[in-house]
């Protein structure tokens, strides 16, 4: 499972050491849909849990922007033809823009393919004139923004909610598709009564995932649940946001070899935390 938060940022002061990022320019918030889509699809695979955005998703979002009424804005980061991030935002007209301290903008989409792009987009947002507060609809829980301000308390999460619940339908393909880090290996016994083809032994190491013969069952260090609960637990560990020791402590994974728990935590760990960034 992955989570997201809605962050409220009182427009604080960026630290002098915070990176500035690159050039940022304004674009048409509705007419630049193809550009936004291209930037998103060209993102490097550095964000665990990220998913693609089909044309239908973009059409619905851009239509909502057009139909909402009132001003909307969008900026992109990077030189023309080499853009690697964008932000779409609008003023919150429910607040009193004549009252100092109340002027608020809402960022409803912030996408950055590199730390440099994120730094540039945030520099632009924090530097907007006559803005007292920025509300970012979707924000990863481990975002470094608070550390980039002179007062980290200027950033507050208004609420945290579930973002992605992952149920692996093809365990062999899923385990083979992701990468692992660290030394050692661990054999995981997956039990899935709903989709029996997933059940079996999987040897996980930095080299990848290999399915073992049933005769290797004595080598298993961990066993992941039964039926839906087991698959859900494996999905949480697969994204990297939930550690194996947490699953074991909650009774959602059986530890057959205590050493396997530490090894699995290292192999499955991800940085940053899983975050989709796309509502669906």
Image (tube, rainbow, N blue to C red):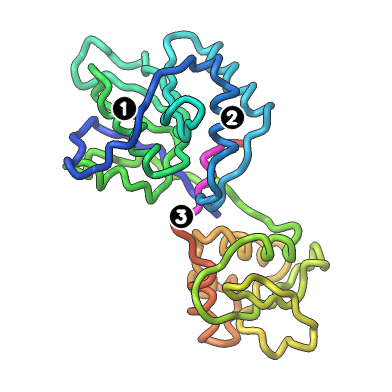
Residue beneath label 1, please?
Answer: 124
The residue tagged with tag 2: helix, strand or loop?
helix
Which tag, 1 or 3, sits closer to the chain's start?
1
Please check the rendered image and state whether residue 8 is part of the magenta-colored stretch, yes or no.
no
Residue 37: mark: 2
Residue 132: mark: none
Q: Nearer the viewer, mark 1 or mark 3?
A: 1
Name the spot of residue 145 as percent of width and height, x first.
31, 43
Which residue is painted at 63% across and 54% down in the image?
166
Which tag, 3 or 2, sits closer to the chain's start?
2
Please check the rendered image and state whether residue 274 is part of the magenta-colored stretch, yes or no.
yes
Name the spot of residue 58 as percent of width and height, x first.
62, 26
Which sits in the foreground, 77 or 201? 77
Rendered image quadrant of residue 18: top left
Q: Which residues are magenta?
A: 273-279
Labels 3 and 2 touching (C-beta < 8 A): no
**Residue 185 seen from this side:** yes
Q: Eyeballing the image, is 252 above or below 15?
A: below
Q: Residues within 10 Å of mark 3 (few under 14, many from 20)?
A: many
Q: Eyeballing the image, is 33 above or below 113?
A: above
């Amino acid at each position: 499972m992955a989570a997201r938060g809605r962050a409220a940022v009182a427009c604080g002061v960026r630290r002098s050491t915070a990176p500035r990022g690159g050039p940022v320019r304004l674009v048409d918030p509705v007419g630049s849909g193809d550009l936004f889509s291209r930037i998103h699809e060209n993102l490097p695979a550095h964000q665990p849990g990220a998913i693609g955005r089909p044309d239908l998703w973009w059409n619905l979002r851009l239509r909502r922007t057009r139909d909402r009424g009132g001003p909307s804005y969008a900026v992109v980061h990077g030189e023309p033809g080499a853009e690697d991030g964008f932000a779409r935002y609008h003023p919150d007209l429910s607040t009193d823009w004549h009252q100092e301290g109340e002027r608020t903008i809402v960022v409803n989409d912030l996408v950055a393919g590199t730390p440099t792009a994120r730094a540039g987009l945030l520099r632009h947002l924090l530097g907007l004139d006559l803005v007292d507060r920025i509300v970012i609809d979707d924000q990863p829980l481990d975002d470094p923004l608070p550390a980039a301000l002179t007062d980290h308390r200027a950033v507050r999460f208004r609420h945290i909610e579930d973002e992605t619940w992952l149920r692996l339908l093809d365990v062999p393909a899923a385990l083979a598709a992701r990468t692992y880090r660290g030394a050692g290996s661990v054999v995981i016994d997956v039990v899935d009564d709903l989709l029996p083809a997933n059940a079996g032994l999987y040897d996980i190491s930095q080299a990848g995932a290999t399915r073992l013969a049933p005769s290797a069952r004595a080598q298993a260090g961990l066993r992941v649940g039964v039926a839906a609960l087991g698959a859900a637990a494996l999905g949480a560990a697969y994204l990297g946001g939930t550690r194996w020791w947490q699953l074991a402590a909650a009774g959602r994974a059986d530890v057959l070899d205590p050493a396997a728990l530490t090894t699995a935590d290292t192999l499955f760990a991800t940085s940053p935390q899983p975050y989709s960034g796309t509502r669906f």
